[in-house]
Image (cartoon, rainbow, N blue to C red):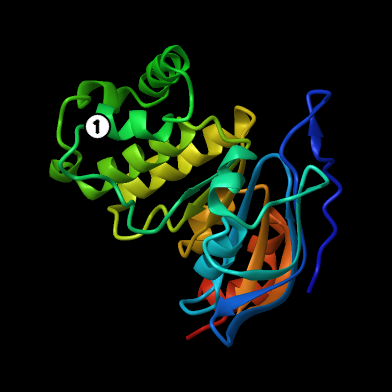
C-alpha cells in the first residue's frame, strides 16, 4: 500500500541530506531479517513504524554500517560506505536504542566525545550550541550521566549525536521506557532538529505520536515494507489504524 508524496527533497533552495535505499537486505549471519527494502528519507522527519521483531533496529544498524548489508544505499546520490567510521564522516549519526552513554563521565564530557573528530575550537563552538539547543543539559553539565533520569539520558544521547554535525540523524526508539511528558518533549526535539535542516530518520513504536510529528512514514512488518506515504495520510489509513491505533477493534 503505497502513497505518493509530492514534497521535493530541496528546501530553501539548497540540497539537504537525501537518503535512498534500493533493494536492501540485511540480517545476522545466514539469517536475513530484511528483504529487498526500498525507501527514502528526504529533508524533514521520516518515521519507520512496526511491531517488535519487524526489523526496524536492524535497518538502522545496516545503514550505519554496524552489520553487513546487500543492496544500494545512496546519500545525496553518492554510495554510502559500509564501514561505520566512514559513515560518520559522510554525515550520518545514529542514536542507538539504550542510549549507550558513559555513565561515569559528566554530561559535558559525553557531549565532547560526540565532536571528537572536530578541532578543539570547533568542538567548543558545538558544545555551546548544544547547550543552547538543550538548556536543561547546560544546568546538568557537570552531573554524571549515569545519575540522570532515562529521559534526560536520552536527551544527552541526542545532543551527543548532534555534536558530530550530522546531515542525517537516525533515532532508534527514542521514547522507549519514558514517561508520556518526556516522550512528547523528545519527539518535539526531533521535529525541531528536522526543521533546523538535519534530515531525521526515526524508528518508533509510539505510532500515534510519531505520525503527529513526522512528514512521511513507512510501516515495516516481518522484514518487508507494507505501507508508506505522508504521515497524515498514513494516520488515516485503515491498515495503520486497525493494526496500530486500535480502530475497528472491540
Q: How many marks?
A: 1
Q: Which residue position is annotated with label 1?
A: 107
Q: Quadrant of the N terminus?
A: bottom right
Q: Could you say where residue 125 lies in the image, as x and y percent from the top left? A: 44, 14
Residue at 60% x, 72% y: name it: 241
Determine whether 53 is above or below 136 in the image: below
Visible residue check, residue 45: yes
Q: Is residue 46 left or right of residue 145?
A: right
- 126 with respect to 89 (left or right): left
Q: Secondary structure at mark 1?
A: helix
Left or right of 211, for residue 135: left
Residue at image x 86%, y 48%? 6
122 to 247, vertically: above or below: above
x, y percentage for residue 196? 60, 27
Q: Percent from the top left, x then y, of residue 166? A: 57, 35
Residue drawn at (36%, 34%) of the image: 113
**On screen, residue 177 above or below 125:** below
Image coordinates for residue 96, horizontal then vertical, percent:
42, 55
Residue at the (45%, 30%) spot, across then down? 163
The answer, for residue 222, to whether it is visible in the render is: no
Picture quadrant where residue 148 is located: top left
Depth check, front residue: 184 or 164: 164
Q: In the displayed structure, would residue 199 be above or below residue 219? A: above
Which one is in front, 24 or 152? Answer: 24
How packed mark 1 is, by other alpha carbons closer than 10 Å (few <14, some 14-19, many 20 or more), is: many
Foreground residue among 220 and 33? 33
Q: Is residue 17 left or right of residue 30?
A: right
Task: Return the residue nearer the eye: 87 or 249.
Answer: 87
Amino acid at each position: 500500500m503505497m502513497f505518493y508524496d509530492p514534497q521535493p527533497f530541496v528546501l530553501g533552495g539548497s540540497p539537504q541530506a537525501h537518503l535512498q535505499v534500493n533493494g536492501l537486505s540485511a540480517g545476522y549471519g545466514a539469517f536475513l531479517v530484511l528483504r529487498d527494502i526500498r525507501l527514502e528519507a528526504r529533508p524533514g522527519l521520516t518515521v519507520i513504524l512496526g511491531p517488535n521483531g519487524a526489523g526496524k533496529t536492524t535497518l538502522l544498524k545496516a545503514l550505519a554500517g554496524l552489520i553487513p548489508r546487500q543492496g544500494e544505499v545512496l546519500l545525496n546520490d553518492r554510495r554510502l560506505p559500509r564501514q561505520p567510521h566512514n559513515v560518520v564522516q559522510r554525515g550520518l549519526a545514529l542514536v542507538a536504542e539504550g542510549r549507550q552513554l558513559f555513565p561515569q563521565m559528566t554530561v559535558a564530557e559525553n557531549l565532547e566525545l560526540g565532536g571528537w573528530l572536530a578541532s578543539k575550537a570547533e568542538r567548543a563552538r558545538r558544545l555551546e550550541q548544544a547547550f543552547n539547543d538543550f538548556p536543561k543539559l547546560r544546568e546538568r553539565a557537570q552531573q554524571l550521566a549515569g545519575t540522570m533520569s532515562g529521559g534526560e539520558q536520552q536527551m544527552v544521547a541526542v545532543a551527543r549525536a548532534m555534536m558530530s554535525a550530522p546531515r542525517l540523524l537516525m533515532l532508534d526508539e527514542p521514547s522507549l521506557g519514558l514517561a508520556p511528558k518526556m516522550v512528547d518533549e523528545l519527539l518535539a526535539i526531533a521535529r525541531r532538529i528536522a526543521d533546523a535542516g538535519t534530515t531525521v530518520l526515526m524508528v518508533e513504536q509510539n505510532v500515534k505520536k510519531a505520525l503527529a510529528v513526522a512528514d512521511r512514514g513507512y510501516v515495516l512488518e516481518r522484514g518487508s515494507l507494507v505501507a508508506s506515504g505522508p504521515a497524515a495520510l498514513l494516520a488515516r489509513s485503515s491498515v495503520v489504524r486497525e493494526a496500530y491505533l486500535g480502530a475497528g477493534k472491540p
